[in-house]
Image: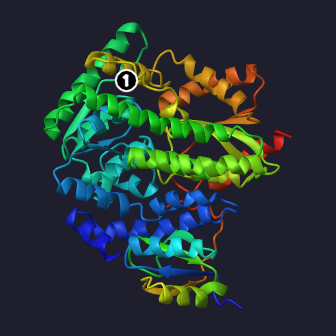
Amino acid sequence: MAEYLHYYVLFQNHTDAMAMYRTLKSSGIFAQISPTPRELSVCCGVSLLIRGEDVEEIRTIASQSSLAYLSIEGLNNAFDNTRHKYG
Amino acid sequence: MADNQKMWGELGMNLEMHDQLCAVLPGAIGDVFLSQENRPECMDYFDMVLADVHGLRPSELVEFRKNGGKVFGTFCAYVPDEVIVAADAIATGLCAGSQFWVPGGERYLPANTCPLIKAMLGARFDRTCPFYRLADVYIGENTCDGKKKAYEILGTDVPMHIMDLPQMKRPKDYLKWADEIKDLKDLVEKTTGNKVTEEKLAEAIKTINAKRAALQRLYDLRKNLNVPISGTDTLLISQIAYYDDPARFASMVNKLCDELEKRVADGVNVAEGKKRILITGTPMAIPNWKMHNLVETSGGVVVCEETCTGTRYFENQVDESGKTMDEMIQNIADRYMGINCACFTPNTARADDVIRLAKDFKADGIIDVNLMFCQTYDIEGRSLEERCKAEGIPFLGLETDYTDNDAQQLKTRIGAFIEMLG
């Protein structure tokens, strides 16, 4: 169903990200605080990793609760704990 | 997130070069942290700090400095944050755990210098770390020859104060360290314009003790046979301890511990069937997660670190009973002199610590990991191995640096060691 491996909610700032995170958590929706992948933004920063099947519900919640975000993007960036590349 | 770029620009950072670090870190964090399963919910605070590691805390330091506050950069577990906090200043660790900064350091240092020291100079002179830009004064210490000489080079670019740490533990050395702490107090007062009063110092001792107590509580939870949190996550917490606000940090660690206590009660185990490993050796500055990642993807789980990013940082408290300034400073000196670093001679107490911790944490084996060219820890490895073998505890000694080149070779050795544990 999902087109991408991972979906990210991108934000203008950390405050907006944390507001969204708290709301999603209290709604029982999976969200993982994550650094914003390079491919999606030119800066380091906080984004939320979400599940593809939750995207539409998250858009609805954000709209109903007036939660600010920039966009929701998909990315095929596999996490591999045996890649052993540490920056 | 454009705010970060603006802040970094105003800090005089090399944006183009720093961008290269920003490009690789999210991938490493995804691989090392986000790939883990069944992580505690309360890791979310530490994930947030990590996700914006060069944005969130630096922006707080920027605001603090705008209001006249002073920031002191530190490199070592021996520098007593209590004195800095008592002057209403901020102490921040100056991380040096990435290969990204090493080539920059090699422009100033011989190649056969430890990667941590090279990364220190690279981060400063390449202008690619906001913390190095935000510290008004750096506090160094002579814990090894490499650092000692590197501080002379750093001192050409930033105000440096060196604490002369004794290298033996005789009664006169404890007094000498107290004198050095008095000098630090004078420097901090002069830099900030704030007096370190007895009341302020007593309060700061309690603040930093509370932070250490929170970390001790976290480590105690790892003694359970059901391991409630991975070593990789705990390492991240220890790394963040060096530069987060101490009171907030303690509060977040305690919140996490509440969750971990529940996990233990519920029988949650993030390391089912894995061998329990105690890591000892040189510090692992952020973002050095290499060894934990290798161990925890090779059939092991790290249950304790006898390192500066582990027990050396938080074990033992400053005695809070001191009333006068001299008593309090001596109590601080006594606590910090209790850290057992390989820069001391003799240093048999470190081996005692390792054996004690291995038993307390029910370790199946010990891995001694030293950064390349760290002579004191490297030499001490032999006697440590003999002690561990005499105690019947399996031991593996490894040497590495910040590159990824030896990862597969290390993994083979670690995998064989863990397999041998049965």
Left or right position of A17 against B231: left
Please indicate whether residue B161 sits to the left or right of residue B345 in the image.
left
Q: Nearer the viewer, residue B362 or A31?
A: A31
Q: Is residue B371 visible?
A: no
Q: Residue at x 52, y 72 (%)?
A: A21
Q: Determine the residue positioned at 48% across, 68% down.
A: B24
Return the x and y of residue B343 as percentages of the image width and height: 44, 24
Q: How is the image coloured?
A: rainbow
Q: Chain of mark 1?
A: B
Under mark 1, the amino acid is Ile
In this view of the protein, which residue sits in the foreground, B417 or B58?
A: B58
Asked if residue B13 lies left or right of residue A73, the reply is left
Q: Residue at x 34, y 17 (%)?
A: B330
Crowding at mark 1 (Cα within 10 Å: few <14, some 14-19, many 20+): many
Q: Establish if B397 lies above or below B53.
A: above
Q: Quadrant of the N terminus of chain A?
A: bottom right
Q: Is residue B355 visible?
A: yes
Image coordinates for residue B356, horizontal then vertical, percent: 66, 24
- Residue topped by disc 1: B332
Q: Residue at x 50, y 88 (%)?
A: A64
Residue A51 percent across, percent down from the top left: 64, 80
Q: Quadrant of residue B305?
A: top right
Q: Residue furthest top?
A: B171
Q: Report x, y in % for residue A60.
A: 55, 90
